[in-house]
Image (spheres, rainbow, N blue to C red):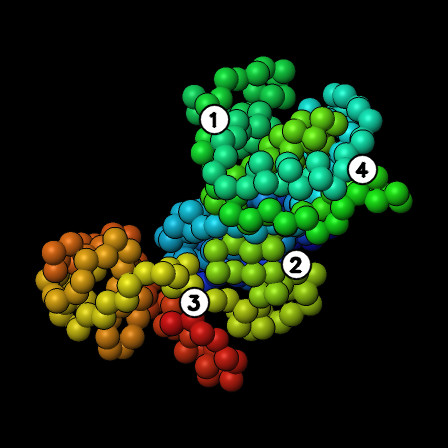
Amino acid sequence: MNAPRARLARRPVHGVLLLDKPLGFSSNQALQKAKWLLRAEKAGHTGTLDPLATGVLPLCFGAATKFSQMHLDADKVYEATLHLGVKTTTADAEGEVLSERPVAVSVEDIERVVRQFTGAIRQVPPMHSALKKDGKALYEYARQGIEVERAARDVTIYALRVLEMPTVAAPHALKMEVSCSKGTYIRTLGEDMGEALGCGAHLSALRRTRTGGFGQTQCVSLEALEAMTEAQRLALLLPVDALLEGHQRVALESESAARFLSGVRRRGDWPDAEQVAVYAAAPPALLGTGRVVAGELIPGRLLSPLDIGEVQAQSAALAQAGITNSTN
């Protein structure tokens, strides 16, 4: 009889891991694998990538999960490959073929459509998406063959750059780089562009190369993560406040810091700001977020004293082991 499998000993882990999500993994599968490798108690991500997609997936651990929602608003950059001439049920390669049409598009046609879909556009969210209707994900309705009415949404395509035009050798492939606002569905963009070209299209490959200030060159693969020691994995974590890019920084002295952590507003000569990252001055430590209105610092999302102590202990342990880590 096989011996019972030893239970993994979890521990508090705090910070942000930039993962290069592999093909075929759901975002949650990738998260759970990284969580297991770090033996982390608490983890979450900042928005999903389809199993078809690869690329930048920020994973949040411990105290960082408090601020993961803030990164959902970040702009994104993708590399997308369209398969022209074939429309599918899911607008990507995983769906069943709905129609096939001949592809007879010119460079001028593609340039026209690129201009058409650059700037502010409206999109109808796809049925095969995690968007909820009456508490149920749209893809659940789609699996039952139910079509749900969806309102069009305003999104912005900041830049749409063609990387590879269709060729004689690959007449159906159109590769492009898309820089877009939050909430943009690249599958829908590809399908709509295919209709505008008159031949239909579906997304055959997708890679996220940037989300907010995080780029693909900063990411680690699951394979590389597996090959590391636990200390090396911890050293990859960015500080919790890496998610607070663009926030005004405010530092509080000891007494004010303690009162702020209790949810009490503080007064000071700070300029008005909607997004503020608040720190204890000594010892330096992130306390949470807030906003400043008319010289009053109003608490937002706050870390617990336990979280703050564990973040400091994690940083001290790595420093003692001689491993450089920027988590504070």
Rounded to the nearest angstrom, the CA distance separating label 3 from label 4 is 44 Å
Instruction: Give whichever of discs 3 and 4 has the lower sequence position.
Output: 4
Of labels 2 and 1, the one closer to you: 1
Rounded to the nearest angstrom, the CA distance separating label 1 from label 3 is 37 Å
Quadrant into which the C terminus falls: bottom left
Residue for badge 2: 222
Name the element at disc 2: helix
Name the element at disc 4: loop
Whether 134 is drawn above or below 188: the answer is above
- Return the x and y of residue 190 as percentages of the image width and height: 65, 35
The amino acid on which the numbered mark 1 sits, given as a three-letter code, is Ala
Rounded to the nearest angstrom, the CA distance separating label 2 from label 1 is 36 Å
Residue for badge 3: 239
Rounded to the nearest angstrom, the CA distance separating label 2 from label 3 is 20 Å
Q: Residues within 10 Å of mark 1 (few under 14, many from 20)?
A: few
Name the element at disc 3: loop
Could you tell me if residue 32 is visible in this image?
no
The amino acid on which the numbered mark 3 sits, given as a three-letter code, is Pro
Q: Residues within 10 Å of mark 3 (few under 14, many from 20)?
A: many
- Return the x and y of residue 180 as percentages of the image width and height: 52, 46
Instruction: Give whichever of discs 4 and 1 has the lower sequence position.
Output: 1
Q: Residue at x 88, y 43 (%)?
A: 168
In this picture, residue 118 sits left or right of residue 13: right
Rounded to the nearest angstrom, the CA distance separating label 4 from label 2 is 32 Å
Quadrant of residue 288 within the rendered picture: bottom left
The amino acid on which the numbered mark 2 sits, given as a three-letter code, is Leu
Quadrant of residue 290 within the rendered picture: bottom left
Tag shown at residue 152: 1
